[in-house]
Amino acid sequence: MLGKRILRERTSIEKMIVMYCKAKHGTNTGLCDDCSYLLGYALQRLQHCIFGEAKPVCAKCPIHCYSKVMKDKIIAVMRYAGPRMIYKHPILALLHLSDSFKSKSISWNK
Ligand SMILES: [Zn+2]
């Protein structure tokens, strides 16, 4: 069973990767191979996150379940898309921010 927070994170991450891919890789619809692999990887990590609904935002997670390479990629995506989410998807961005505050940190621009 996937809870509300996990589902929301799935939506956020997907939107962020789409935004990033469009801007950086010039894809118009869907994702390039690299980015669809990254999305699949991210969704899988989320699904297997041991914290479930109590999950901290990934940047502050003590487990660091991403491999080094994938972590660098997702950080690049978040740097690019994080601040832009506020304009394109304000509700999701705010919810993400409030999750960040709850875990006493902001995951962007670190
Ligand atoms: Zn791409």
Image (cartoon, rainbow, N blue to C red):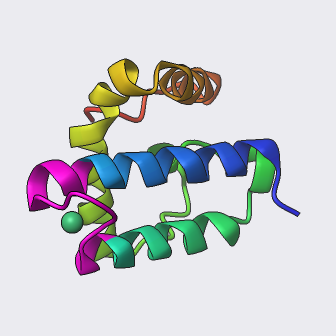
Q: Is residue 48 above or below residue 21?
A: below
- Name the residue rendered at 51%, 70% in the picture: 65
- Name the residue rendered at 81%, 59% in the picture: 2
Magenta stretch: includes residue 25: yes
Most foreground residue, 110 or 36: 36
Most foreground residue, 99 or 4: 4
- Name the residue rendered at 34%, 64% in the picture: 30
- Which image quadrant: the C terminus? top left
**Looking at the picture, how far across and down is residue 100, in whole percent?**
54, 28
Most foreground residue, 72 or 89: 89
In the figure, is residue 72 to the left or right of 43? left
Magenta stretch: includes residue 38: no
Ligand 1 location (quadrant): bottom left
Q: Is residue 90 above or below residue 40?
A: above
Residue extending furthest front?
Answer: 29
Count of numbered tags: 0
Q: Is residue 86 above or below residue 54?
A: above
In the figure, is residue 108 to the left or right of 11? left
**Looking at the picture, how far across and down is residue 6, in whole percent?**
70, 51
Q: Which residues are magenta?
A: 20-35
- Which image quadrant: the N terminus? bottom right
In the rendered image, is residue 76 in sight? no
**Looking at the picture, how far across and down is residue 17, in whole percent?**
34, 54
In the figure, is residue 24 to the left or right of 90? left
